[in-house]
Image (spheres, rainbow, N blue to C red):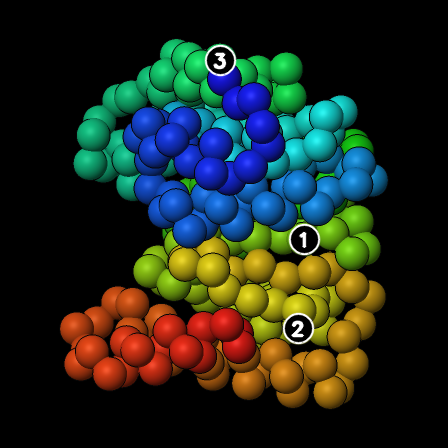
Amino acid sequence: MIENKTWKNTEPLFSAIEGFLSPEEGGFLFRMAGTCKGMGAIVEIGSWKGRSTVCLAAGARDGIKIYAIDPHSGSSEHKQQMGRIDTLGEFQDNIKKAGVGHKVIPLVKTSELAAEEWQGPIEFLFIDGAHEYELVKQDFELWSPHLIEGGIIAFHDSVDWPGPKQLVRDEIFLKSGYAEAGVVGSITYAKKIKDCGQMQMLGKKWKLFLKYFYDYGRTHQVPGWIRGLGKLMLPRI
């Protein structure tokens, strides 16, 4: 049970849940959820066993709902590796143990089916569903129109996986509808705006260059001094 809303108190609950989110990334989700003011919901595409869901719910203010969208039958990668799975029971148990069940609304269906019924505004959108490019693009196209101006979008595995990596390059860094892009761990995030303008577009292209440098350092064996340089550059992304 979370008694005080701090990442220090949330992290042990986070670490007890099986998942692929790092503590650095979990802390980011916790803090970003805490910046939401109730102008829209928090929506995550892909919940697995609730690791990211607990971060979002623990960080969010009371009254803000987290819609956790997942069919709980596994993504295509999970099915290839594990066969038929069902994560709903573990998800529900983990949310209950963390004491955040009153904030979480599970939508046990695919992203596409959930989008057919969705009507409300979204203040923070976290996309971590299937990682094939066409499916990441589908999640983006279905859900980003509901994101309010000034709202934040974030993509997990946008460094290590080709699909999310290409999507954030094409739609976040090379188009004018998002600004203030950044990277935390393997998460790329940005703020939705009407038009970021020419100077901010140039700034985003510079950040994209830095991201390529950072991506390479994370995914290849490189000398320690290069990793160190990447760490120095990361806060500037």
Query: Label 1: which residue?
Result: 152
Q: Position of residue 207 (x, y in %)?
A: 54, 79
Please determine whether, in this image, residue 122 is positioned above or below residue 99: below
The residue carrying pointer 3 sits among few (fewer than 14), some (14 to 19) or many (20 or more) residues within 10 Å by Cα, namely some
* Foreground: disc 2 or disc 1: 1
Please determine whether, in this image, residue 223 is positioned above or below residue 36: below
Please determine whether, in this image, residue 157 is positioned above or below residue 40: below
Q: Position of residue 142 (x, y in %)?
A: 65, 44
Q: Mark 2 falls on what kind of element?
A: loop
Q: Mark 3 falls on what kind of element?
A: helix
* Foreground: disc 1 or disc 3: 3
Query: Label 3: which residue?
Result: 96
Q: Residue at x 56, y 22 (%)?
A: 3
Q: CA distance from mark 3 to mark 2?
A: 40 Å
* Foreground: disc 3 or disc 2: 3
Query: Label 2: which residue?
Result: 175
Q: Residue at x 49, y 46 (%)?
A: 27
Q: Which mark is residue 5?
A: none
Residue 52 seen from this side: no
Amino acid beneath label 3: Lys
Amino acid beneath label 1: Ile
Amino acid beneath label 2: Lys
Q: Mark 1 falls on what kind of element?
A: strand
Front one among 165 and 63: 63
Q: Residue at x 63, y 15 (%)?
A: 102
